[in-house]
Structures are given as structure tokens and as C-alpha cells.
Amino acid sequence: MPEILEVEMYRRAAESVVGRTVRSFATNDALVVKDGSQIQTLVGSCVREVGRHGKLMTIHLDHGSIDLHFGMAGRIIVDGRSPIDELVYGASSNDRWIRFGMQFDEGFLAITDPRRFARVSTSQKMSALGPDAFSEGLFDLVQPRLPVKGSIKGVLLNQQVIAGLGNMLVDEILSRGKVDPRRDISMLSGSAIRKLFSAVVVILPELLERGGSHMGDLAADLRVPGSRCPYDAHELARDTVAGRTTYWCPHHQK
Ligand SMILES: [Zn+2]
């Protein structure tokens, strides 16, 4: 699933359309594209900037902005290439998964999503989102939004507390921070919580460099029953925490 790191890769890929003028939009998937007729009014606008806040990407044009949520499996294709696996998209069968497109004088930008959880709309207010997880001074920004109760895993997944973290990144952060994902935030000291957010600041750029949120020490291939902790070889525990399948090490995460 695209988390903050994947969306940042998408944003960087989309930057190559800055300065291009939109000739047409493909907005015919009404489940994914909420207000296609509004978006169509932006034909003829030039792309000025591509922003990101948490998992939300925004394309700013001369006369409006478009928000892109990638959902569970949405991917961006820019001029035929996806930044995620470098798979080259030509006029292949994958074209049937294109849910939204922007055609320029030269080249195009599209969202493919076999599962149709992606959402595209003209920009909405982002006031409900917490600070972006890449923000400078992250802990000070997040602190006033922290709830007094609830599992620490649920707190880190809550986009209104901190925007951008998903299931795999949160498991990685809790593993490196040595905290049991089920722990209630009310049972953690202020310094323990601060340490977790210090871990976020280290982990995000590191995993972006390694290639994505699946590249943590608790890597995607360890997320199967019976696998062992990469640090101490104890068997990982698996359960649903905060509604998500969660892996952790009962030996070093307390
Ligand atoms: Zn361990």
C-alpha cells in the first residue's frame, strides 16, 4: 500500500510535468474521480507545482488544484513509467486500470488502480490532517494532537495526529523503538513517546533511500507467520492491532 515514502516517490516523478499545459483529462471513472466536471474546467491550465502532505498528493495548476489519494493500490504513471518498480507501461492490458489521466501536449500522467480505492478530486481543505511525518520539529507539532488513550499503533496510524504513516512503517517504527504495538499511550512516559518520534525522523529518510516502506529491518518478506525478529531471532508475534495485521517481537518490544 502506498505510504508516505511511495507518495513522495510519486510526487518526485510527477514533478517532471511541471510547466506542461493540460490538453485533456480522463475522468470517466466516477467512483475514483469525484468531481470530474469541475476537473474538466482546468483544461488549458499549466501545472505549477506538485505538493504532498502525508499520503495526499496535490497537483497545483494555474486555475485550481487536484488532490490525489492513492488508496490501497494506486500507482502513478508518468510518461509511461512508474517510479515504483520501473515497469514500463505501454499500450498494455494495464491500461484498463487507468482511473484518471492528464494528457499534455507531450506525455501524460495517469493513476492506475486495479482495486479502485484511489480518489481524485479538486482540492479540499487539509485542516483535519496532522503534520506531515517529514516535518521539521515533528514531535513539537504532533504533541498537542496526541490522544490520552488508545494503542500506540492506532495513534501512529491516525492521520489526524501525524500524516503519512501506514501499517508497515508503523510496525518498523515500533520495532526500532522497542515498544509493543498494543501498549496504551497512557502507559508510555513522555520521553518514551518523544523517542518514538525521534525514530520516525531517522527511519523515513533511510527507507526512502532504500526504496520504500517495505524495505525496513522488519521487511515485507518477514510479514508471514513463523518468521523471526531480525535483531534477536525470536519468533515474531502476529495479531490484529488497531484494525491492521501487525507483526512485532515480544522479546524486545515491551
Ligand atoms: Zn526482537
Image (cartoon, rainbow, N blue to C red):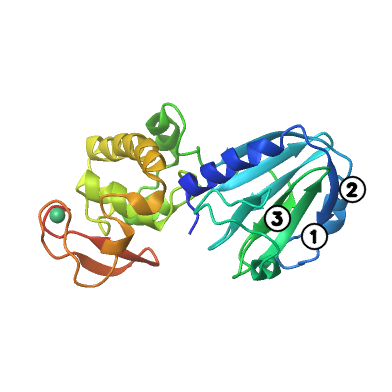
Q: Which residue is labeled 3 in the image?
A: 120
Q: Secondary structure at mark 2?
A: loop
Q: Secondary structure at mark 3?
A: strand
**N-term-proximal mark, 3 vs 2:** 2
Instruction: Name the residue type under label 1.
Output: Thr
Distance, label 3 to label 2, CA atoms, is: 15 Å
The answer to whether the residue labelled 3 contacts the one labelled 1, judged by CB atoms less than 8 Å apart, is yes
Q: Secondary structure at mark 1?
A: loop
The answer to whether the residue labelled 3 contacts the one labelled 2, judged by CB atoms less than 8 Å apart, is no
Distance, label 3 to label 1, CA atoms, is: 9 Å
Is 81 left or right of 123, judged from the image as shown?
Answer: left
**Ligand 1 within 8 angstroms of badge 1 C-beta:** no
Q: Position of residue 237 (x, y in %)?
A: 20, 66
Q: 43 above or below 114?
A: above
Instruction: Name the residue type under label 3.
Output: Val
Q: Which sits in the foreground, 155 or 97?
A: 97
Q: Which sits in the foreground, 252 or 207?
A: 207
Q: Which residue is labeled 1 in the image?
A: 27
